[in-house]
Image (tube, rainbow, N blue to C red):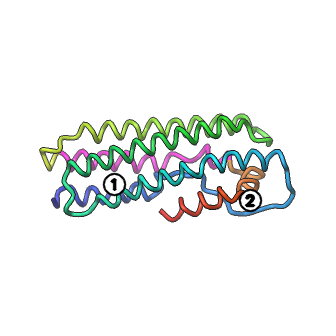
Amino acid sequence: MEGTNPVNKKLAAALSGGAVLVLALSGCSSDDGDDKLDSWAKQVCDGVQPQAKKIEAANASIQKQTSDNSTPEEVQETDAKAFQDMSDAYKAMGGTVQKAGAPDVEDGEKKQKDAVTELNGLSASYASLRKQVEALDTDDQAKFADGLKDIATELNKLSKSGSDALKTLEEGEVGKAMAKQPSCKSASASATAS
């Protein structure tokens, strides 16, 4: 099984290297309580936390499947399910941010729209990766390993490109309000632990 193993390790590394884009919070808190913003932050954080856990679990399942004794079929099945879970989680996050409405800050509406677009884009990208993994030929070890390499490359790109709109959404007062939410603190801690 040496053929797939190093590649699958690359896949796992690409995932843990930041493809898991969970709202990375600044962690700073402020006490100049803006109730409207705090309420918005609570709604977003409470909705995002279970999705962050789902992404983390999907990530862990791919990393677990990198052992030498995994067959291409096992790797394919695990990766396909993990990518689908990630796709669903990002879609749900986009829905949460959409439903919360625009935060009560300057350019709040644009920031919210951009974040929703980005999260939905990530959802579509992971759905596409799932299709790519499912299409790989598990009977041909070398072809399978090459296919996984391409997927790892895509994952790397995803991890580098994904989080600009989310970072913008979380700047300033929004970030401070989110940092006060217990559910965001735990989502952030679990995201950075992966």
**Residue at coordinates 75% horizontally, 41% vertically from top-left?**
103
Residue type indicated by callout 2: Lys
Q: Secondary structure at mark 1?
A: helix
- Indicate the position of residue 64 as horizontal and vertical percent values: 33, 61
Q: Residues within 10 Å of mark 1 (few under 14, many from 20)?
A: many
Dominant SS type (magenta): helix
Q: Is residue 34 left or right of residue 101?
A: right
**Residue at coordinates 52% horizontally, 51% vertically from top-left?**
21
- Indicate the position of residue 54 as horizontal and vertical percent values: 48, 51
Q: Residue furthest left?
A: 140
According to the image, label 2 marks what residue? 180
Task: Give the magenta part as a residue range.
Answer: 144-169
Label 2 or label 1, whichever comes before in sequence order? 1
Q: Is residue 146 magenta?
A: yes
3D distance between C-alphas at marks 2 and 1: 34 Å
Res. 27 mark: none
Check the image and report above or below for 133 versus 34: above
Res. 11 mark: 1
- Kindly report which numbered mark, 2 or 1, lies closer to the viewer in this rendering: 2
Q: Quadrant of residue 116?
A: top right
Q: Is residue 165 magenta?
A: yes
- Indicate the position of residue 117 as horizontal and vertical percent values: 58, 34
Q: Is residue 193 left or right of residue 101?
A: left
Q: Residues within 10 Å of mark 2 (few under 14, many from 20)?
A: many
- Indicate the position of residue 35 as horizontal and vertical percent values: 84, 49
* Quadrant that contains the N terminus: bottom left
Q: Secondary structure at mark 2?
A: loop
**Residue at coordinates 85% horizontally, 55% vertically from top-left?**
33
Residue type indicated by callout 1: Leu
